[in-house]
Amino acid sequence: MSGVLVGVDSSTQSCKVLVVEAATGTILSTGVAPHPDATAVDPHVWVEALRRAWADAGVAERTDVLGVGVSAQQHGMVAVDRDGVPVHDALLWNDVRSADQAARMVQDLGVEGWMEAVNVLPVSSITLTKLAWLREHRPDAAARVHRVMLPHDWLVLHLSGAFATDRSDASGTGYFSAVTGAYRPELLERYFGAVPELPPVLGPGEAAGTLLPEWGGGRGRPVPVSAGAGDNAGAGLGLELEPGDVVVSVGTSGTVFSRSAAPVVDPSGVTAGFADATGDHLPLLCTLNAARVMTSTAQLLSVDLDRFTELARSGPSDAHGLTMLPYFDGERTPNFPDATGQLHGLTRASFTPENLARAAVLAVANSLADCLDVLRGIGAPVERILLIGGGAKSEALRSVLPDTFGMPVEVPRAQEYVALGAARQAAWAATGRPPRWGRRIESVLEPTGDPGAGEYRARYGRLRASLE
């Protein structure tokens, strides 16, 4: 398969564009443009960031683009009027203003009712809760809503003119069931008071449309733009996940997810029953607080990340009794939207830069371990752990995860797996099948038997339980 593919990753922080050799998956060029550091943004800024990253990657000058795919942050509410103009800033996944609406939804239908309806429990991240907030707090804007879409749908629309989505992203809205493969419009009617036009849900190998001439790249040939995907499903596609593989991704958020051929239902509602980008399922748990816990602590200590790592690795392995709950921005797993961070066990001996740095690292590790324990508890196979994401580059975090998880952790070669997954999906739409590029494991992190990790985990569990 000669030619190139273009994979787009529009994340919370930035837009990345990769130009990938179709035959091998080799990255030939990249472009990156930042996004605002906010939980509510004008969605037009994503298009402008895409244009800058697209130009930096040199896509428009190429004549050999076979296909384009987009993967983006999940859940973000993009609501537009009949002219296609957003009626409000897009509320992102990490915007917690709709926590009250989410709580009322759960009280209304109950956990069992929601799991039966869409296999996802409403929390403030979910799109439906954001629409309910809009209806309650911005009724004039809500009355103008004609279409509702997600961040990747918005970019596909601007790339191709097509209004479409895929199962993976639709499954994170709260009004689509990955189990039945259908929208639940009655939930929109109940909680938003109307049923806006929703994008058709395409299959994993389908094209939404073709690239508009303004983007270049085809030189007169039609270039398919694939259905797209949510970011975690895109990462799964980029990693070529198999059943039993569990991905731990550390970025702005922390996510723990696996691939399953059949729907996985968590009676507690803690695990979201999302779809993946292959036609299977993607049971997923997400934390709001991950890498930024470590960067915020480094800023407090007035050190760079290299020095932060040195501090975290030089103190006692259990942080000398200091324990942190990392709920700086509320939390999604467990569902504590109004929680704040806590620091417990302060003494003159424990309150040192070394212990504070290590407590922050162990707090992130334990938050992720909580998610892993939930997956195990609902019977999802946990045979192999793959560690990815920008925060996963932290040597301090790598050093504590195996003992915290109680099993080895494999670190694939650092790649932009979300964008690579988008590129694989683009190939699927262009050729009828996804390529097999393989994944290369950079290292395997083994447990050391360090008792400090176990001591910290026990203290962390008791502190977390005090909030329940």
Image (spheres, rainbow, N blue to C red):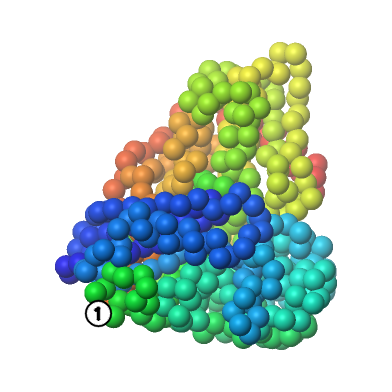
Q: Residues within 10 Å of mark 1 (few under 14, many from 20)?
A: some
Place of residue 337 in the rendered image (x, y in percent of width and height, measured from the top left): 75, 53
| Rendered residue at 51%/29% (across/down) | 305
Kind of residue sitting beneath label 1:
Arg
| Rendered residue at 61%/82% (across/down) | 83
| Rendered residue at 36%/49% (across/down) | 415
Residue 292 in view in this figure: yes
The answer to whether 394 appears left or right of 342 in the picture is left
Q: Quadrant of residue 128?
A: bottom right
Q: Secondary structure at mark 1?
A: loop
**What residue sits right under mark 1 in the picture?**
221
Viewer-proximal residue, 216 or 191? Answer: 216
The answer to whether 66 appears left or right of 31 in the picture is left
Residue located farthest toward the left when viewing the structure as drawn: 2
Viewer-proximal residue, 231 or 246? Answer: 231
Place of residue 273 in the rendered image (x, y in percent of width and height, measured from the top left): 58, 68
Residue 258 in view in this figure: no
| Rendered residue at 34%/38% (across/down) | 443
Place of residue 8 in the rendered image (x, y in percent of width and height, measured from the top left): 41, 62
Place of residue 419 in the rendered image (x, y in percent of width and height, measured from the top left): 39, 59
Q: How many marks?
A: 1
Using the image, determine if residue 183 lies above or below residue 392: below
